[in-house]
Amino acid sequence: MVTQPALIMRVFLASILVLVIPIIRAQVPHWGPCPEPEVQPAFILKQFMGRWFEIAKLPAQFEKGRCIETNFTLTTDNSIRVVSSEILKGEVRKIVGTGVIEDPKNPAKLGITYSYVLPYSPYWILSTDYVNFALVYSCTDVLRLFHVDFAWILGRTRSLPDATVEKARETFATNNIDVTRMIPSRQQGCDKTL
């Protein structure tokens, strides 16, 4: 016999799953809370600004096209204009968002949103040399029961040497971030100006 509290808990969890599963369909869910990776020490936001190309990523439902890139522009000391673009079905598609430094003591932990009604999502810079590559991680906990990961390897050019990509993957793995499902991004045939 199922007790009233147990039944309520089952209905609650089922409701959460019904709401969350469509959101994470293409993402990489994992049991337990988000890992707490080390971020870039002494991060300098101004040096990170500019154009970054997506080299590899964990699957993300909101990124379906090719030639994905993001341009970061500093608007105030801790506010950033974020313009992401991709080519999807032959069309250039852009989305504009806002980024902020969520904790001035830890400027490598940014928050980004593409909507006025949605909260900022974590956008943590794990490592960057500012001129060639950047490793970015985002994670969202769902009731601390499971989490959804996003991870990106970015480059200032549309490709990076294989050794750089491999070292980036190792950096994620050392920080308990599972990148076994990481896929290369398509940066070929990007003749349209984004």
Image (cartoon, helix red, strand yellow):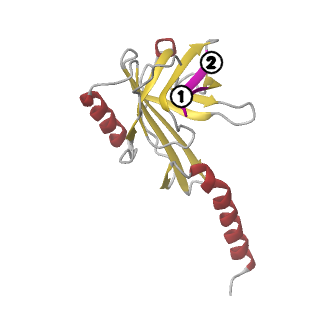
The amino acid at mark 1 is: Glu
Q: Which numbered marker is on residue 81?
A: 2
| Residue located at (46% from left, 19% from top) | 191
Q: Position of residue 20 (x, y in %)?
A: 63, 54
| Residue located at (66% from left, 64% from top) | 13
- Residue at the far left: name it: 163
Q: Earlier in the sequence, mark 2 or mark 1?
A: 2
Q: Is 83 rendered above or below residue 119?
A: above
| Residue 83, magenta (yes or no) | yes
Mark 2 vs mark 1, CA separation in Å? 17 Å
| Residue located at (40% from left, 18% from top) | 156
Q: Which numbered marker is on residue 86?
A: 1
Label 2: element kind: strand
Residue extent of the magenta highlight = 78-93
The amino acid at mark 2 is: Arg
Does 135 sit left or right of 24 as displayed? left
Q: Which numbered marker is on residue 62?
A: none
Q: Is the Cβ of the residue at disc 2 closer than 8 Å to that at disc 1?
A: no
Seen from the viewer's position, the closer of residues 147 and 19 is 19
Task: State whether the magenta stretch is mostly helix, strand or loop.
Answer: strand
